[in-house]
Image (cartoon, rainbow, N blue to C red):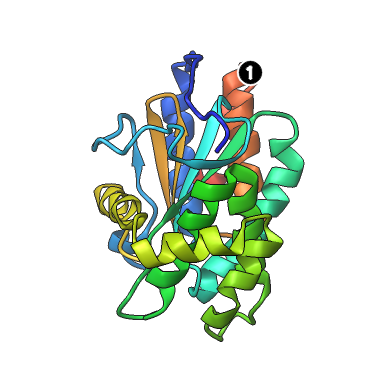
């Protein structure tokens, strides 16, 4: 895995608190949610101790980015497949500039997707053996291998592992030993701390500020949120230009 410790603190403008509130309200209206219990939640300070990004995480983009998106995901979740594509679009635009990092954490919903924990364990084995790039290659292969409403063919997992550059024997040994189960349990526990009750569940963090995204939001909405945050960080944010729904 690539080093992922955040070594640089981010100075957060005072206006960013207001900006996060506007974003949270905008998500509520855009998503068409009808009940506060299902709307994304904005907090001025992180209310819980979500595990900090470390070299145990798998990160796409600049690990020291000022905007970090931590996703808790299930490989067999149809909405996660949609969101995975959306996040790649986001990273193609903002990851290359170093402004945004995408952290993938495991949150398999065994009651809905019985094979999801096995796929998560396989992904963690691939990452443990092959590193960050292998993890992302494997994850992309899993999502790309199926239609949204069908489960992953788990018999293909060794094939995906070797395609990601991992030795097949080493992969099979890892799976048989169950040595990545503790890492999987740690991700699950952290997802519960983060408030995840379904997938995908994403926390956007800027310094000690955070906004929660519940579900597979669209590229256009995420892009608007990130542009807003970048403007706040760069000191060019104009609260008077916020949409009417954010008043």
Name the residue beneath numbered marker 1.
234
- Taking depth in this image into account, of 176 and 159 the one nearest to the observer is 176
- The crowding category of the residue bearing disc 1, from other C-alpha atoms within 10 Å (few below 14, some 14 to 19, many at least 20), is few
The answer to whether residue 119 of the structure is visible from this angle is yes
Q: Position of residue 238 (x, y in %)?
A: 61, 25
Q: Name the residue located 52 percent from the left edge and 35 percent from the top edge.
A: 68
Q: Is residue 45 above or below residue 10?
A: below
Relative to 25, 88 lies left or right: right
- Taking depth in this image into account, of 172 and 64 the one nearest to the observer is 172
Query: Mark 1: which secondary structure?
Result: helix
Relative to 100, 53 lies left or right: left
Q: Is residue 86 above or below residue 51?
A: below
Q: Name the residue located 64 percent from the left edge and 82 percent from the top edge.
A: 147
Relative to 96, 33 lies left or right: left
Q: Is residue 112 above or below residue 198?
A: below
Q: Position of residue 213 (x, y in %)?
A: 44, 52
Furthest residue toward front: 169
Q: Position of residue 175 (x, y in %)?
A: 42, 65
Furthest residue toward bottom: 150
- Taking depth in this image into account, of 202 and 40 the one nearest to the observer is 202
Kindly indicate the quadrant of the structure image that contains residue 240: top right
Q: Name the residue located 75 percent from the left edge and 35 percent from the top edge.
A: 96
The answer to whether residue 220 of the structure is visible from this angle is no
Q: Position of residue 173 (x, y in %)?
A: 45, 62
What is the count of numbered marks? Answer: 1
Q: Name the residue located 46 percent from the left edge and 33 percent from the top edge.
A: 55
């Amino acid at each position: 895995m690539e080093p992922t410790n955040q070594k640089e603190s981010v100075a957060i403008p005072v206006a960013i608190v207001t900006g996060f509130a506007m974003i949270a309200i905008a998500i509520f209206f855009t998503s068409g949610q009808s009940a506060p219990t299902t709307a994304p939640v904005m907090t001025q300070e992180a209310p819980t101790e979500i595990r900090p990004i470390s070299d145990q995480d798998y990160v796409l983009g600049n690990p020291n980015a000022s905007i970090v998106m931590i996703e808790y995901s299930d490989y067999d979740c149809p909405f996660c497949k949609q969101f995975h594509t959306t996040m790649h679009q986001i990273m193609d635009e903002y990851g290359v500039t170093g402004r945004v990092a995408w952290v993938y954490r495991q949150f398999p919903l065994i009651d809905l997707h019985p094979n999801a924990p096995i796929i998560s364990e396989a992904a963690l084995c691939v990452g443990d053996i092959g590193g960050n790039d292998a993890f992302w290659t494997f994850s992309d292969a899993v999502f790309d291998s199926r239609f949204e409403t069908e489960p992953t063919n788990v018999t293909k997992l060794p094939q995906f592992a070797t395609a990601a550059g991992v030795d097949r024997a080493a992969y099979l040994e890892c799976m048989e030993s169950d040595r990545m189960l503790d890492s999987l349990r740690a991700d699950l526990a952290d997802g519960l701390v983060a408030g995840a009750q379904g997938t995908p569940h994403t926390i956007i963090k800027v310094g000690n500020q955070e906004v929660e995204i519940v579900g597979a939001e669209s590229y256009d909405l995420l892009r608007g949120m990130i542009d807003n945050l970048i403007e706040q960080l760069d000191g060019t944010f104009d609260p008077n230009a916020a949409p009417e729904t954010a008043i």
